[in-house]
Image (tube, rainbow, N blue to C red):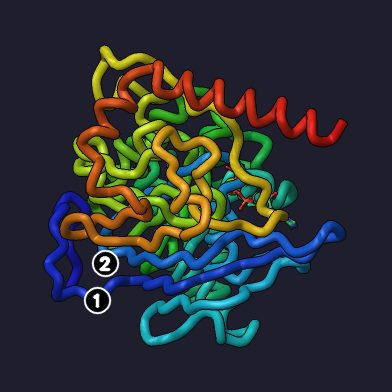
Amino acid sequence: MTTHATDRVSTGTDSPVIAVRNLSVEYVTERGVLRAVDDVSFDVRRGGSLGIVGESGCGKTTLIKAILRLLQKNGRIAGGSIEFGSRDLVSLSAEQIRRVRHAEIALVSQSAMNSLNPVYTVGRQIVEGIRAHKSIGVADARRRAIEVFNMVGLEEKRLDAFPHQLSGGMKQRAIIAMALSLEPALIIADEPTTALDVVVQGRILRRIQEIHRQISSSMIFITHDISVVAEVCDTIMVMYGGRVMEIAPTDTFFRAPYHPYSLGLQNAFPDIVDKNTELVSIPGTPPDLMQAQHGCRFQERCPFVTDACRTETPPLVEVAENHTVACLRTAEVAEFRTAAADGATWERVRERLVRAEAENAGGRA
Ligand SMILES: Nc1ncnc2c1ncn2[C@@H]1O[C@H](COP(=O)(O)OP(=O)(O)OP(=O)(O)O)[C@@H](O)[C@H]1O
Ligand SMILES: [Mg+2]
């Protein structure tokens, strides 16, 4: 059974298409071990679309590379499980996971555009991609290629083009067509449009949205642009410093966010919530994950930090149905929302960071 993407309310009877539990991923580097993804758990509903947002370096790409088992050599899954169908992707052999990729979980990424082979036509690449996973003839595979090209709004004749003959937007659409060609249960898009100009970006996003409505595939959509998620996804997951800060239905997230980091993010994109809100970006930078982390990852930049936040890592708690938040102070959210809408609140954070920096410099001198 599948549910329509616009059905925001989970029926509760559907098992999720993918269930990630307590996933941790580490990179071994010369400076030490960096935990890029730390104890992350989430589900994607069948037919649902999950948007993952967070500042650069918060672990979004690492998370999906771990799901697809495409981590670089120095990366490793340090714990947790990735339930997909009846399998745990973490324990599949290289050959088994290779069969899952593309056919069952397809990836559309920024770098995929460059991965098109310049010496073959895009049509040939799609046909071969299909035939690598399905035992069908060239003619049938070509018919499927035409179908998916139509879906993404590319004319059939473009199948016979070489990658260099296509514009950036067309290439990205060809990549999306390729991802759709095997009707994967899950499509993961990692910043699929950031390399494109704004107009083309908008067009492709709308196309992705339309396609998602038409087909039964589920989707994970990764971006650092929260407004994109507002357009494309039914659920939003906010990451920070490798951890999940908040998961909520998208409309709830924009109406009633909880986490102080979410409140800060929304201020940085005022046009989504309220055109009159002041544009305030969150002062400071994400934590250095090479250092051991104690307490909440957002503590340095949080206007509402307490001593407890510095020692206790907040667990994800449920504040409403399908809405979980990793903050020790969820009970005070009403006050926080008011305070976070005031630029002075974030200005005090900036001053605090400047003082801390000066003290550190003094200590080093
Ligand atoms: N191969 C690697 N070796 C060491 N550290 C890495 C490696 N790949 C990523 N990292 C680090 O892991 C952390 C998470 O990186 P990741 O690329 O997953 O972030 P991201 O959220 O996708 O960022 P962006 O929005 O810039 O794409 C960062 O601190 C990054 O520097
Ligand atoms: Mg990334």
Q: Is residue 303 visible?
A: yes
Quarter-of-image position of residue 346 = top left
Report, in whole angstroms, how far the alpha carbon at label 1 lies from the one at label 2.
7 Å
Name above or below for residue 101 compared with residue 250: below
Which of the 4 image quadrants contains residue 341? top left
Name above or below for residue 99 compared with residue 355. Answer: below
SS type, badge 2: loop
x, y percent for residue 281:
47, 24
Instruction: Label 1, secondary structure: give it.
Output: loop
Q: Residue at x 29, y 72 (%)?
A: 16
Q: Nearer the viewer, mark 1 or mark 2?
A: 1
Q: Local crowd at mark 1 within 10 Å, few (<14), some, or many (≥20)?
A: some
Amino acid at circle 2 = Arg
Q: Are the residues flagged by discs 1 and 2 in contact, CB closer than 8 Å? A: yes
First along the sequence among labels 1 and 2: 1
Q: Give the position of the C terminus as an image quadrant.
A: top right
Residue hosting label 2 = 46
The residue at the point 46 percent across, 37 percent down is 302
Q: Which mark is residue 15?
A: 1
Q: Measuring 65% from the left and 31% from the top, which residue is drawn there? A: 356
Residue 344: image location, x then y, percent: 40, 16
**Ligand 1 is within 8 Å of the C-beta of the residue at disc 2:** no
Q: Is residue 191 left or right of residue 219?
A: right
User: For this rendering, which residue is in front, 356 or 137?
Assistant: 356
Return the x and y of residue 340 as percentages of the image width and height: 33, 27
Counting from the top left corner in percent of width and height, residue 163 is at: 65, 42
* Residue in the foreground of this view, choosing between 193 and 353: 353
* Amino acid residing under circle 1: Ser
